[in-house]
Amino acid sequence: MPQITKITSQKQKGRYNIFIDEQFAFGVTESVLIKFRLAKGLEIDSSLQRDIQKEDDNAKAYQLALNYLSHQLRTEKELTQHLRDHEITPEGIETSLTKLRELHYLDDQDYADSYVRTVINTSDKGPKVVRQKLIQKGVSANHIDQALTLYTDEEQVTVGLATAQKLAKKYRHSSFFEQQQKIKQGLMQKGFGGDNLSRIIDELALEEDSDSEADALAALGEKKWRRYRLLEPRERRMKMQQALYRKGFNIDAINRFIDDQEVSDDTE
């Protein structure tokens, strides 16, 4: 009967080389060494060797999983894919998942709750985007629904208002109409909607400023004028009206701007 003739340490801490009849046979982790009481002189048949190697595969999978989880929280889907990428067998994956669930190292509800709390404290995302992100990470609908109860209406308005204020600053050189549209569109893209979206817009309380509106019209109008300047006057006026009206400027203000530009060109 084949027997272990030597056991040596590997360079990798916690792993050992097993020699059978003076020939290297396989490597094992320390937990497997202890579990099977591997020692010099122990007789090992092919069946026992398969059991040892199977247990070692599971031990390696579990250690790989622990290392992956040590950096940050992960979902079951993320961990499963990580183990697959490292060619861990389905049995090894399931064994690791089961053990990690029992130890509460792997908990999709805990992950979802933590994700939502992080969004509330550090992000500009609304609940719709949060839901989509969690779906992509493989979190179940029930877990997501439970986690989103943490994202109360008041917190959505608080986060959304801060986001809206940033958007208002970003689009401050647009027409008042376009600024409003861009802010609303931006909030929707970030996942805010429904009554809370309306509340955010109301609390933002944007007010039109005639001087800012005039400055915005002049800045954009001059760019468009340079673009269409060489066209025939009638076509140029039509192009200018269309371009500026689409941006939300008042048609009377647009016509006054065009009139002023025409006068200015005639006097040059």
Image (spheres, helix red, strand yellow):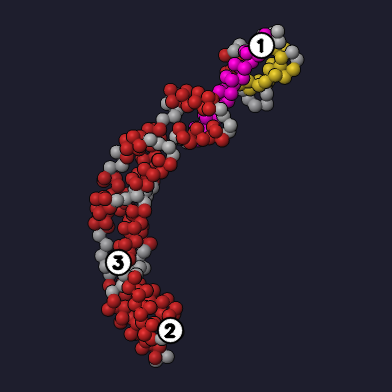
Q: Which of marks 1 and 3 is in front?
A: 1
Question: Which residue is at the far right?
Answer: 22
In the image, 237 versus 4, the foreground residue is: 237
- Residue 231's disc number: 2
**Residue type highlighted by circle 3:** Phe
Mark 2 or 3: in front is 2
124 part of magenta stretch = no
Residue 40: give x, y in percent of width and height. 69, 10
Q: Residue 108 carries which label?
A: none
Question: Residue 13 or 58: which is nearer the viewer?
Answer: 58
Identify which residue is drawn at 26% across, 46% down.
Answer: 154
Q: Which residue is drawn at 45% across and 32% down?
A: 76
**Which numbered marker is on residue 45?**
1
Q: Which amino acid does label 2 sit on?
A: Leu
Query: Which residue corresponds to mark 3?
Result: 177
Q: Which class describes the residues within 10 Å of circle 3: few (<14), some (14-19), or many (20+)?
A: some
Mark 2 Cα shell of 10 Å, populated few (<14), some (14-19), many (≥20): few
Magenta-highlighted residues: 43-71
Residues tagged 1 and 3 counted as in contact (Cβ below 8 A): no
